[in-house]
Structures are given as structure tokens and as C-alpha cells.
Image: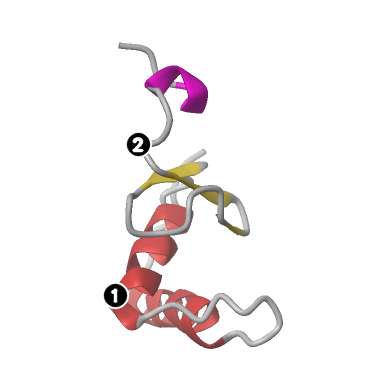
Amino acid sequence: MEAKKLSPSQWATERIASINYYTYRPKKKAQLYFWDSLIVAAAERAGCARLLSEDFEDGRSFEAVTVVNPFVHTPDEFGLRI
């Protein structure tokens, strides 16, 4: 899938919308801190299925992105081979 070309202002607007979505949406109660919402928004925008982090709650999902704590699971458990 080819990424669409965005002007700088379109890119900034899209990033801010993603950040606000994860920071302020009350229904799903994501309620992330600003910097954490940047990480989730970037992972979602990049099309990542998993976000490796020890700081987020293991197994928590944000739309299509699921958090995996790499210190709790083996690489095989989340689809990586060593």
C-alpha cells in the first residue's frame, strides 16, 4: 500500500487529529499523556499491529495497535523469530 502524499499543513493536521483522538476521547477512556499519545498515533499511522513497550499496559489495544511488553513475552509469542 502506497502512502498518500501530504502537504506539510495536511501532515500536521492529521498528526494533531490522531494525538487528540488518543489523548481526549472519553468513550474508550484512552486518556493518554501527550507524549504517549504521540507514540500510539505514530504506530497506528505506520500500520503497526503491535507496539513493544514496557510502559503501557500489556495487551491493551488502541484500535488496530496492541501493546506487547517484550519483557513478559518471548519473541515467538508476538510473531518475531530470532
Q: Which colour style is shown?
A: secondary structure
Residue 4 in sight:
no
Amino acid type for the residue under numbered disc 1: Trp
Q: Is residue 76 magenta?
A: yes
Task: Give the spatial CA distance, label 1 vs label 2.
Answer: 20 Å
What stretch of residues is rendered in magenta? 75-79
In the image, which is nearer the foreground, mark 1 or mark 2?
Answer: 2
Asked which quadrant contains residue 69, the reply is top left
Q: Residue at x 64, y 87 (%)?
A: 26
Q: How many marks?
A: 2
Above/below status of 38 relative to 74: below
Could you say which quadrant of the image residue 35 lies in?
Answer: bottom left
- Residue at the spot x=45%, y=57% of the render? 45
Residue at 33% across, 50% down: 54
Residue 72, position as x, y percentages in the image: 40, 36
Q: Is there CB contact under 8 Å for labels 1 and 2?
A: no
Q: Residues within 10 Å of mark 2 (few under 14, many from 20)?
A: some
Mark number displayed over residue 66: none
Sort mark 1 into few (<14), some (14-19) or many (20+) by Cα contacts within 10 Å: few
Q: Look at the magenta stretch and give its main secondary structure.
A: helix
Q: Is 46 rendered above or below residue 34?
A: above
Quarter occupied by the C terminus? top left
Amino acid at pointer 2: Pro
Judging by the rendered image, the residue that carries numbered circle 2 is 70
Q: Mark 1 highlights which residue?
A: 35
Mark 2 or mark 1, which is nearer the start of the sequence? Answer: 1
Task: Pick out the residue farthest to the top.
Answer: 82
Q: Position of residue 12 (x, y in %)?
A: 33, 79
Dot 2 falls on a residue whose secondary structure is loop
Q: Residue at x 35, y 36 (%)?
A: 70
Instruction: Name the residue nearer the viewer: 47 or 8.
Output: 47
